[in-house]
Image (cartoon, rainbow, N blue to C red):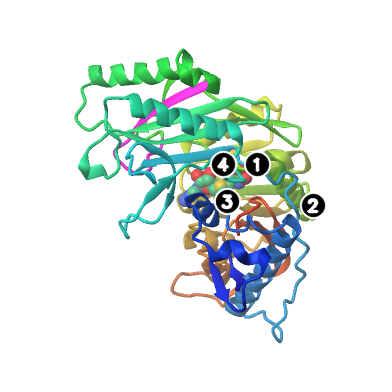
């Protein structure tokens, strides 16, 4: 009776059949959550890949229209078949569980949201059934719920309503290490009172029922805002070791609590291999790794380059990147801390093009500031740019226009325009509608 139109839309088209009878009943809370977090979960993996490939084609056609390279409704460059994720289930190495009112009304429920704050209809549902989450994350979420239910402190649901216990983030690696970060609103507690509650979390997770989670690191962040960096409010190590480590393509990476790391290790390897393949022609020159996180892209390509310069906003990630280069015995990488839009306009004009100059940019969903694009486009020695985006239909589209469109005298973007030459989707997020898109631009 329903036709699958997009992950969030179903269209009524025909009479029910036994295969679609599940749609004729009210969906359970778990099914509703799965439809939000992993909306492709009802499809087989091959169907998911096909759906994503079609989506990427639509996005690239939209981009071609925006930048004026569309040729009679067709792409003027190849879109290669999507690279599948080597792992389909339980692939996430990082999960965040919120605290809010559950299905039964209990305000100390740890899970993921259905509904929105704006709609005042949030229900927090346990994520135990979600296909993309590993069992050890689910266990930590459940234990945290037990802990806060036993705590005399209230949960912090609306910041202005008081309460303390907020979300918990779990990070794991392929070697089985687990890091948990508890976020806590201090409200008006004294430091002595705070110490009591911090000690209680440590006791619970090291000697109490939570010991079953075998946490290697337990962090605590007192935060009065939705998201605080380590700089704004330090991550306090309450127990265990300060970092988690992961191995990618034979390189070891240290990851701090505040640092970004790709959520799917196997697919990250596939992504970096794809980038390496597309960057082959640019060996021996200088590589700019823009929004470099813990340095994974630059480090994995360093042996082919004369020099790598990484730029990253989060200080802890930059410290990780420097440490990671040393950890892997790499000496040709330099990592700079700060906003790309502040660093690059000064840095890029000073770079010499000896051996070639290439940029690989991998911004968050917000895309790059136009000042970064201006610096890249206005430096004529940069002949090749690889743009990796997990949301190419979003803010990245603005960047594509700035890179490939006509000169913009107002923004002083006047360098020769880039042209897209090849695109490769990489599936980093099975069961969800998202994937990474690697786009090569040349001129
Ligand atoms: C999608 S991650 C990519 C990380 C890295 N390339 C990797 O593969 O692990 C985006 C990174 O951009 C950083 N970032 C966000 N805004 C930034 C800015 N204005 N300047 C520099 N880095 C920024 C984030 O902190 C994050 O580490």
User: Which region is colored magenta?
Assistant: 215-229
Q: Is residue 375 left or right of residue 146?
A: right
Residue 111 appearing in the image: yes
Specify the quadrant of the image occupied by residue 436.
bottom right
- In this rendering, the answer to whether 420 lies above or below 317 is below
- Front residue of this view, candidates 30 and 350: 30
**Cα–Cα gap, marks 4 and 3:** 23 Å
Residue ID at (58%, 58%): 39
Q: In 3D space, how far apart are the residues under numbered discs 4 and 2 (Cα atoms)?
A: 21 Å
User: Residue 279: within the magenta?
Assistant: no
* CA separation in Å, label 1 and label 4: 20 Å
Dot 4, how many residues are within 10 Å of its Cα: few (below 14), some (14-19), or many (20+)? many
Q: Earlier in the sequence, mark 3 or mark 2?
A: 2
- Circle 4: element type: loop
On the image, numbered disc 2 is attached to which residue? 277
Pointer 1 or 2: first along the chain = 1
Task: Examine the rendered structure and indicate whether residue 208 appears above or below residue 61.
Answer: above
Residue located 41% across and 28% down the image:
146
Point 43% across, 49% down: residue? 113
Pointer 3: what residue? Answer: 350
- Residue 228 lies in the magenta-colored region: yes
Tell me residue 136's x, y (percent).
Answer: 58, 31
Gap in Å between the C-alphas at discs 3 and 1?
41 Å
Nearest to the eye among marks 1 and 4: give it: 1
Residues at marks 4 and 3 touching, judged by CB atoms closer than 8 Å: no
Mark 4, ligand 1, within 8 Å: the answer is: yes
Vertical order, 414 against 301 (above or below)? below
Q: Nearer the viewer, mark 4 or mark 3?
A: 4
**Tag nearer the camera, 3 or 1:** 1
Secondary structure under tag 1 reads loop
């Amino acid at each position: 009776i329903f036709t699958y139109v997009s992950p969030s839309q179903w269209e009524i088209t025909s009479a029910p059949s036994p295969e679609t009878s599940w749609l004729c009943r009210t969906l359970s809370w778990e099914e509703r959550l799965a439809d939000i977090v992993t909306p492709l979960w009802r499809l087989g993996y091959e169907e998911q890949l096909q759906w994503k490939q079609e989506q990427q084609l639509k996005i690239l056609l939209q981009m071609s229209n925006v930048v004026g390279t569309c040729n009679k409704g067709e792409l003027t460059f190849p879109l290669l078949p999507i690279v599948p994720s080597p792992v389909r289930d339980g692939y996430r190495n990082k999960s965040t569980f919120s605290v809010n009112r559950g299905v039964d009304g209990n305000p100390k429920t740890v899970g993921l949201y259905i509904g929105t704050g704006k709609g005042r209809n949030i229900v927090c549902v346990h994520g135990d059934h979600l296909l993309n989450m590993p069992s050890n994350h689910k266990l930590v979420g459940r234990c945290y719920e037990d802990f806060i239910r036993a705590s005399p402190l209230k949960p912090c649901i609306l910041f202005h309503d008081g309460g303390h216990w907020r979300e918990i983030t779990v990070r794991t690696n392929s070697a089985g290490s687990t890091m948990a970060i508890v976020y806590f609103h201090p409200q008006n507690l004294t430091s002595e009172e705070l110490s009591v509650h911090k000690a209680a979390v440590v006791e619970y997770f090291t000697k109490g029922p939570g010991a079953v989670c075998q946490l290697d690191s337990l962090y605590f962040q007192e935060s009065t805002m939705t998201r605080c960096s380590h700089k704004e409010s330090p991550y306090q190590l309450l127990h265990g070791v300060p970092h988690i480590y992961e191995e990618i393509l034979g390189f070891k990476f240290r990851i701090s609590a505040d640092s970004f790391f790709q959520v799917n290790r196997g697919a990250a390897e596939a992504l970096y291999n794809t980038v390496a393949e597309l960057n082959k022609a640019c060996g021996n020159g200088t590589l700019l790794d823009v929004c470099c996180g813990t340095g994974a892209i630059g480090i994995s390509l360093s042996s082919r380059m004369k020099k790598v310069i990484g730029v990253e906003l989060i200080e802890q990630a930059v410290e990780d990147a420097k440490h990671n280069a040393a950890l892997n015995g790499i000496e040709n990488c330099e990592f700079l801390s700060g906003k790309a839009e502040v660093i690059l306009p000064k840095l890029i004009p000073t770079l010499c093009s000896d051996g070639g100059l290439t940029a690989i940019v991998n911004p968050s969903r917000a895309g790059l500031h136009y000042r970064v694009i201006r610096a890249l486009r206005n430096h004529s020695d940069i002949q090749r740019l690889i743009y990796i985006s997990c949301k190419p239909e979003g803010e990245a589209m603005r960047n594509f226009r700035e890179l490939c469109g006509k000169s913009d005298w107002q923004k002083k973007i006047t360098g020769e325009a880039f042209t897209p030459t090849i695109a490769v989707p990489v599936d980093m997020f099975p069961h969800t509608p998202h994937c990474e898109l690697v786009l090569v631009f040349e001129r």
